[in-house]
């Protein structure tokens, strides 16, 4: 049956694994983008097209037909593992992510050689597989919502196959300024921008990223139809978030955390060990705080969630090691028999992270660059007593939250430490006022509105 509304994303709303008896079991897919889209699609007739990410996923696809084990019917694509590896790890996560987050150590990287061209061919093949699947799944005049940097080429490919459908593409990452985007090979830059230009609507999380895209398209293609470019900030659903944060597993985690931190003030960060998240500098800033303000020793605890990310790539494994080393150094320098200043966890524990955000006196969000950062919006909504948000000016969320957060230069460790001191010592009245304003901004555009606005833009 053809679908009138399609979502295309690298990752789906359901994934599969084997239980202890070797049986295939379904689990809800992870990631902020997936959660936001699932919430927005409730009650719709949408079909979600995604890639099989594991051997268990591939087995599930061999059942044939749509997979209906999750919140949205799914067409999962069994793409050749070598093509997936080249597209996902080598191009999407090691090239496009690095370009749009300005992460390259440019004296040494990038290197666009023959081996890289082979990886790029995989990315092209991956996008073509999605375009062909969408063309086969779409009803006449269907609306197709393509998601993120994994699928930059899909709009143009799909336009060639199905000129009748309406196509939107949404980029959840930042967009690089023209001089940095120019690191890409010239023909690749053209192919990416032509891919997006074929869409009827191109969306970004904040005006800063949309302007950067327009500047790149104008420079590379000579023109950009700005009427097709839109800004759609993504907020949180406060009712769903608060309901989840008061379930029994979170209450148990909250009691355990309170026992661990005692009477100390609590600084929290919840991140993946992702190069752009700036975990190391954040921990170093906490050490600087204890060095500059010894009165906080044994009175403050930094609870750090550093979930391992992209461990298939060596640079991420090395970064995870560096995060752990930074935490260990602070604990070695300042820890006592009765007080461990940094409580770090590298285990993915969603209930415990929700509990920490409820407990937090200060929430640290200091990426060097981030498309939005939903943690910055979730933390104030979850806070039990009012939280002070320390927020990098390099996040998309800064466009909405800057007036109520304490803003950070993410590279300035000393200034970040000073902001931590300011937050810890802030009086309760100001904390409450700032947190209330953060909550109002964070909930102004919940996922259903965010998605509906993009669908409306296609009409």
Image: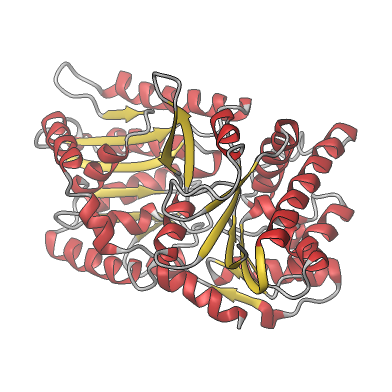
List the single residue furthest toward the top.
337
Q: How many numbered discs, if any?
A: 0
Looking at the image, which is closer to me, 81 or 132?
Answer: 132
Give the quarter of the image for residue 350. top left
Q: In this view, does 378 lie above or below 354?
A: below
Q: In this view, does 342 lie above or below 46?
A: above
Q: Is residue 412 left or right of residue 162?
A: left
The x, y position of residue 132, in whole percent, is 75, 55
Q: Is residue 163 above or below residue 341?
A: below
Q: How is the image coloured?
A: secondary structure
Image point 62% across, 25% down: which residue? 314
Looking at the image, which is closer to me, 87 or 407?
Answer: 87
The x, y position of residue 188, in whole percent, is 84, 53
Q: In this view, does 297 lie to the left or right of 30?
A: left
Q: Is residue 231 left or right of residue 434?
A: right
Image point 18% across, 24% down: which residue? 339
């Amino acid at each position: 049956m053809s679908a009138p509304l399609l979502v295309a994303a690298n990752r789906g709303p359901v994934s599969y694994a084997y239980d202890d008896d070797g049986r295939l079991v379904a689990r809800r897919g992870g990631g902020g983008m997936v959660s936001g889209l699932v919430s927005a699609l409730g009650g719709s007739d949408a079909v979600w097209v995604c890639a099989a990410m594991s051997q268990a996923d591939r087995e599930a696809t061999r059942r044939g037909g749509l997979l209906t084990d999750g919140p949205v019917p799914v067409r999962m694509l069994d793409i050749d593992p070598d093509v997936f590896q080249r597209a996902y790890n080598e191009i999407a996560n090691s090239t496009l992510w690095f370009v749009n987050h300005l992460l390259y150590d440019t004296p040494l990287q990038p290197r666009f050689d023959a081996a890289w061209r082979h990886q790029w061919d995989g990315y092209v093949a991956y996008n073509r597989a999605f375009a062909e699947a969408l063309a086969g799944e779409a009803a006449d005049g269907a609306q197709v919502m393509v998601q993120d940097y994994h699928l930059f080429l899909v709009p143009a490919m799909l336009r060639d196959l199905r000129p009748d459908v309406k196509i939107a593409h949404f980029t959840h990452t930042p967009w690089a300024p023209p001089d940095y985007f120019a690191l890409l090979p010239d023909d690749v830059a053209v192919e990416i921008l032509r891919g997006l230009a074929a869409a009827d609507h191109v969306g970004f999380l904040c005006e800063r990223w949309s302007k950067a895209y327009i500047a790149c398209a104008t420079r590379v293609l000579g023109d950009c139809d700005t009427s097709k470019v839109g800004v759609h900030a993504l907020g949180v659903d406060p009712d769903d978030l608060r309901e989840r944060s008061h379930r029994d597993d979170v209450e148990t985690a909250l009691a355990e955390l309170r026992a661990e931190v005692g009477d100390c003030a609590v600084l929290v960060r919840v991140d993946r060990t992702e190069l752009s998240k700036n975990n190391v500098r954040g921990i170093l800033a906490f050490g600087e705080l204890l060095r500059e303000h010894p009165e906080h020793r044994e009175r403050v605890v930094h609870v750090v969630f550093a979930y391992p990310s992209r461990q298939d790539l060596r640079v991420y494994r090395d970064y995870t090691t560096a995060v752990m080393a930074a935490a260990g150094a602070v604990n070695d320098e300042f820890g006592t028999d009765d007080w461990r200043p940094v409580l770090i966890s590298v285990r993915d524990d969603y209930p415990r992270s929700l509990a920490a955000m409820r407990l937090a006196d200060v929430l640290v969000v200091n990426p060097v660059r981030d498309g939005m950062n939903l943690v910055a919006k979730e933390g104030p909504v979850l806070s039990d007593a009012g939280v002070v948000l320390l927020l990098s000016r390099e996040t998309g969320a800064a466009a909405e939250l800057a007036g109520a957060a304490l803003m950070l230069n993410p590279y300035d460790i000393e200034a970040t430490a000073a902001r931590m001191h300011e937050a810890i010592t802030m009086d309760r009245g100001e904390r409450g006022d700032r947190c209330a304003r953060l909550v109002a901004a964070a909930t102004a555009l919940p996922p259903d509105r965010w998605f509906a606005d993009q669908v409306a833009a296609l009409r």
